[in-house]
Amino acid sequence: MYRNDPILPTFALILAAGLFYAAYLDGQHIARLLGHVPEKLSVGQIGLMAFGAVLLLYGLMGLVSYWLEGMELRPGRHFPTPSTAPVAAGVILVLLLTALSGFFVRLLVYAAQTGHNPTWLQGLIFGSISLVVAALFGIYRRFFGREEVITEEEKSEFPW
């Protein structure tokens, strides 16, 4: 069986943090050379941040996969064990999701009435809503979903 190690995703997260810090230090170096804070990002900063974002996404996907599937996949059917802690976490997350959704709608109504449109706050709230929904899906998948692991032989009938 293939192992699902958290070592490589953790290393990717550490490398992503290092790349974001290097982009920050590059901006500080440019500011020191120019004598003021630059208004634009340099090409190097954009490249470091893009590569760091890719590594950050890869590391998060790997750690979520490790959390959901465990260290090693075992063939067969797996049934969840009932527990009250995931239910309580789900209820709290649903209440948080309801509050965030209500605040998002109130913010949209405020923007329509006054003409002042705080897009950064709208994006922040919508991103928070997306993360809460992702956490709810993860909790459901981890603690409530039945799974079936199927394996194939090395020589299957597929040509590839």
Image (spheres, helix red, strand yellow):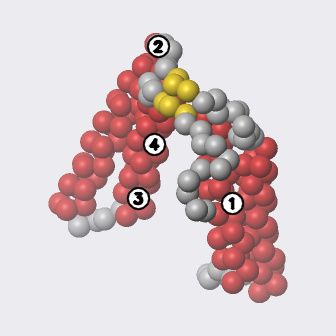
> Could you say which quadrant of the image residue 65 lies in?
top right
Of mark 2 and mark 1, the one earlier in the sequence is: 1
Reply above or below: 29 against 91: below
Q: Can residue 115 be seen in the rendering of this structure?
A: yes
SS type, badge 3? helix
Q: In this view, does 106 lie to the left or right of 49?
A: left
Residue that carries the numbered disc 3 in the rendered image: 123
Reply above or below: 72 against 29: above
Write the residue at 61% across / 56% down: 57
**Disc 1 marks which amino acid?**
Leu
Residue that carries the numbered disc 4 in the rendered image: 134
Of mark 3 and mark 1, the one earlier in the sequence is: 1
Q: Is residue 122 left or right of residue 21?
A: left
Residue that carries the numbered disc 2 in the rendered image: 82
Residue 117, image x and y in percent?
A: 31, 65
SS type, badge 1? helix
Residue 12, image x and y in percent?
A: 74, 54
Residue that carries the numbered disc 1 in the rendered image: 55
Of mark 2 and mark 3, the one earlier in the sequence is: 2
